[in-house]
Image (cartoon, coloured by chain):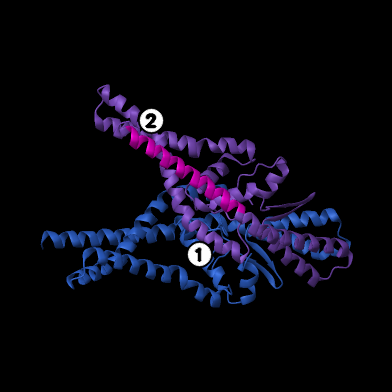
Chain colours: A blue, B purple
Amino acid sequence: MGKKDKDKSSSKVSRCILLIAVVGYYLMGAKIFQVLETDKQEELRNSFLEAKAALMKNYACITSDELEIFLQTLTFSVKNGIIPLKNGTLYLSWNFKNSISFVAYTLTTIGYGTIAPRTPMGQLFCVFYALLGIPLTIIFLELVSKAISQPLSGLGKYLQNMGIKEGQVKICMLVFFLVTGLLIFILLPPLIFTHTEGWTYEEGLYFAFISLSTIGFGDYVIVKQKKRRLRKLHFSGL
Amino acid sequence: MGKKDKDKSSSKVSRCILLIAVVGYYLMGAKIFQVLETDKQEELRNSFLEAKAALMKNYACITSDELEIFLQTLTFSVKNGIIPLKNGTLYLSWNFKNSISFVAYTLTTIGYGTIAPRTPMGQLFCVFYALLGIPLTIIFLELVSKAISQPLSGLGKYLQNMGIKEGQVKICMLVFFLVTGLLIFILLPPLIFTHTEGWTYEEGLYFAFISLSTIGFGDYVIVKQKKRRLRKLHFSGL
């Protein structure tokens, strides 16, 4: 085995280790958040349901003070991702799927904030988890982008061999990158969102940009709810 | 005037231009957001106040359907930064101060999302505004960090002149940077927040990290409200 082959295989191994480390780190983090946060979120949900039930029972003789207290409870609930609906309550629980989403949004620094740790332990863990996880994510994404761009550098060499000047090839490649990047990450996704999320094209464009730039307001978030009504009420333009 | 002096003064001029460009860009953006968003936010606030007034008037004979509709209105309101309080309504209006905060949080990609554009025009502008503003902010922050670290490189040279080895000096400087950075940006601010925001030290630490890492969930946000009650209700742990 030559030196080149050795280097190649060792770099493959290290990439594989990195991939496993990233996946492992994501899964582990998601699990820890789930364990730390489930009770608190359940508690918040129950206190909202209790307040609602109490109001329902007493609404014929409710006083203004009672109503104010209820309103403040409701406000607190909504800020914690608990959304009252006609047929039950939608709430962003710390199930595994949501927890994975949370981890991904945190380590890419998007941070929508639709779901976030509320317990002191969860918050403290979040700090140390992200401290290591963010650089890890960056290294990982750099590797991914290198992997994607490698076949394209082959295209550049092919163009050069065809007798096109180096400067022109570089410009060609840059334009190609910009156009395909813009199409794949910014211009095409909104077309999908109009169907899946019930957003306008402009709303989808806004969401795509806010996410890619890692701003992540959390005013628009992708949900794969089956009921369109839920989706519209909970996320469209809220 | 020598070449060095010329370079120095021209670099000073270009820095000055950059500073003005950044400040101008921030002010202009804040103004445009204010113009685009004020009406919509006012409208949202009014529809919440109307719904609340209607409930107050009718609560003795309210039906379940009526209540559900009210709850959904309230949810929508809270998600838009309109917080019902005992003595009136707190709402994050697009006044100039809030608009400046929004711009700063957007262009640093923190994106708390406590206030965000709701009109199609505001959202579209936000995309193009940030497209130019984020790189500008990065260049600006790099210059600032260079300016801060320049006097410290003088300290490094001084240590070297005192006969300390280059390697040791580098380690010293790194430790010095880490310790001071950690103190100034992560460990000391929470002490201030415990007084100004009514948070625990851990909550302050969490907020400092979530902000500096540009994650920006928006679950904790600094407010300079005079009433402690407001602060506690609206932002502490919500």
Task: Using the rendered image of the protein, determine whether residue A129 is visible from the camera's viewpoint.
Answer: no
Q: Which chain carries label 2?
A: B
Q: Mark 2 against mark 1, which lies toward the viewer?
A: 2
Nearer the observer, A131 or A174: A174
Q: Quadrant of residue B160?
A: top left
Task: Look at 30% across and 67% down and name the residue there.
Answer: A173
- Looking at the image, residue B122 sits to the left or right of residue A8; the answer is right
Q: Which residue is drawn at 57% across and 53% down?
A: B29
Secondary structure type for disc 2: helix
- Residue assigned mark 2: B151
Seen from the viewer's position, the closer of residues B14 and B178 is: B14
Query: Dot 1 lies on which element?
Result: helix
Q: Give the range drawn in magenta.
A: B5-31
Q: In the image, is B51 to the left or to the right of B60?
A: left
Which image quarter holds the N terminus of chain B? top left
Query: How busy is the neighbourhood of tag 2: few (under 14 within 10 Å), some, or many (20 plus)?
Result: few
- The image quadrant of residue B196 is top right
> Chain letter of disc 1?
A
* Cα distance between the residues tagged 2 and 1: 49 Å
Judge whether B162 appears above or below A235 on screen: above
Verify whether residue B29 appears in magenta: yes
Which residue is found at the position 38% from the left and 61% from the top?
A23
Q: Which amino acid does label 2 sit on?
A: Pro
* Residue type, mark 1 in image: Phe
- Left or right position of A158 against A112: left
Q: Where is residue A69 in the image (x, y as percent from the top left)?
A: 78, 54
Disc marking residue A96: 1
